[in-house]
Image (tube, helix red, strand yellow):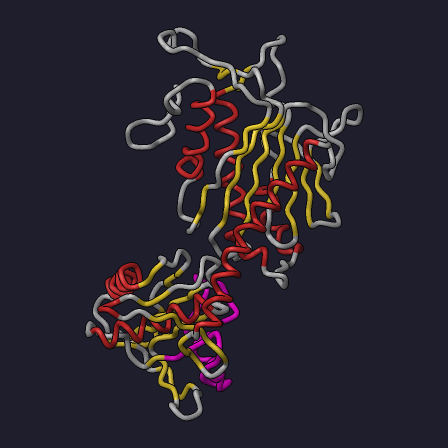
Amino acid sequence: MINRNIEEISKEDLKALVENEVIEHKTIEYKRELPGNSDGDKKEFLADVTSFANASGGDLVYGIVEDKKTGKPKSLDGLSIGNPDQELLRLDGIIRTGVQPRIPSVICSKPIPIQDDKFALVIRVQKSWIAPHRVILGGHDKFYSRSSNGKYPLDVGELRMAFTLSESISERIRNFRTNRLSQIIANDTPVTFYGDHKIVLHLIPVISFDPAQSYDLGRIMPNINKLKPISSSGWNERYNLDGFLSFTWNKDQGSYSYTQLYRNGIIEAVEGLLLEPDGGKLLIPSIAYEQELIKSTSNYLSLLRSWSVAPPVFIFLSLLGVKGFTMGLNSWRYRHHDIHAIDRDTIILPEVVVDNYDLKGEILLKPSFDSIWNACGFQRDFYYNEQGEWKPG
């Protein structure tokens, strides 16, 4: 795989592959031409894509001529294509209809100009954590993976192992969340915390459960504001054993909001002021808490993207200590609705899966917000219009 963010790959990077004779291997493959529209070409393309997704990920580089015997790149010739963007859409369509389950994290680069009207195309396939994926085009039904010698079909034993690994990753993600919620309830937090009623937001990239996964914490500094604690104006920050922590601080009480970035890419954000009883009333500040969660989720996803953390990312929202709370609303506007109190102390909502970073925080959180409104007796979150946009007021 080319050691650069997909958006940053340039002609010079591709020339360096040729000049340094970087041989095709487990995470990179060169192609002189794009696949055509025949079933044979499409199957070969899908075999390449799924083999990367089922292994360690990798780059398909189109427009480089390779030596078939040695795998060395010989020249960067580029591709004579009239509409590169249309070609990328065509290839994306082949992937979407020819692979099961759908690969959520295939990223296509913008076309890279080479000379005159010639371009190179790079398709980056991240390692998939919902693997194995199979090629299903035209009656074809095979699973592929990769080694240093290129792609190969998986045998029965390898398939069994791949399915077992996929299931264990999902279980580990949910176990991590459950364990962290237990510790937060027990006040085992990275900074002294006050408040009995808490909003907890977890962003858990699936790739974080690769035992070797670790990120350079120094890279966070240019984007430090994206780690802002939920509903805070000023905050402190420091490195800690788990990674990097941003937190509010009151010398007499401690913190009411913190965001912990783990060095493997997991983010945990806990806030305890928004749900503080107002004059003894147990109210969820409907607009304020949704607004803060939308902003924070967008910031945290942007941070993961800048860190090149590959999707999918699981988003979990939980509310702790909320038995007896009702939704705080304009009583005149909602006078025809029966407002009910939440009937349990802990609300643990199902995950929302983010398979690309272009989705807006308000769209991603809508299912979670709907569930909380359900818990308060409403059909749905009425701050969303018919187009799915968050429009309170």
Q: In this view, does 383 lie to the left or right of 291?
A: left
Residue at 74%, 36% in the rendered image: 188
**Is 164 part of what is drawn in magenta?**
no
Return the residue nearer the eye: 247 or 110.
247
When the figure is inspected, residue 386 is found, relative to residue 281, above or below; the finding is: below
What is the quadrant of residue 65 in the picture? bottom left
User: Quarter holding the C terminus?
Assistant: top left
Return the residue nearer the eye: 294 or 157.
157
Q: How many marks?
A: 0
Q: Position of residue 174 (x, y in %)?
A: 56, 45
Q: Does residue 12 appear in the picture of this structure?
A: no
Q: Does residue 192 appear in the picture of this structure?
A: yes
**Is 17 part of what is drawn in magenta?**
yes
Residue at 55%, 47% in the rendered image: 204
The stretch of residues the image draws in magenta is: 1-30
What is the quadrant of residue 96 in the picture? bottom left
Q: Where is residue 230 in the image (x, y as percent from the top left)?
A: 59, 32
Residue at 23%, 72% in the rendered image: 81
Return the residue nearer the eye: 272 or 52.
52
Q: Position of residue 117 (x, y in %)?
A: 26, 73
Residue at 64%, 39% in the rendered image: 259
Return the residue nearer the eye: 90 or 327.
327
Q: Where is residue 387 in the image (x, y as percent from the top left)?
A: 29, 32
What is the quadrant of residue 177 in the picture? top right
In the image, farthest residue toward the bottom: 69
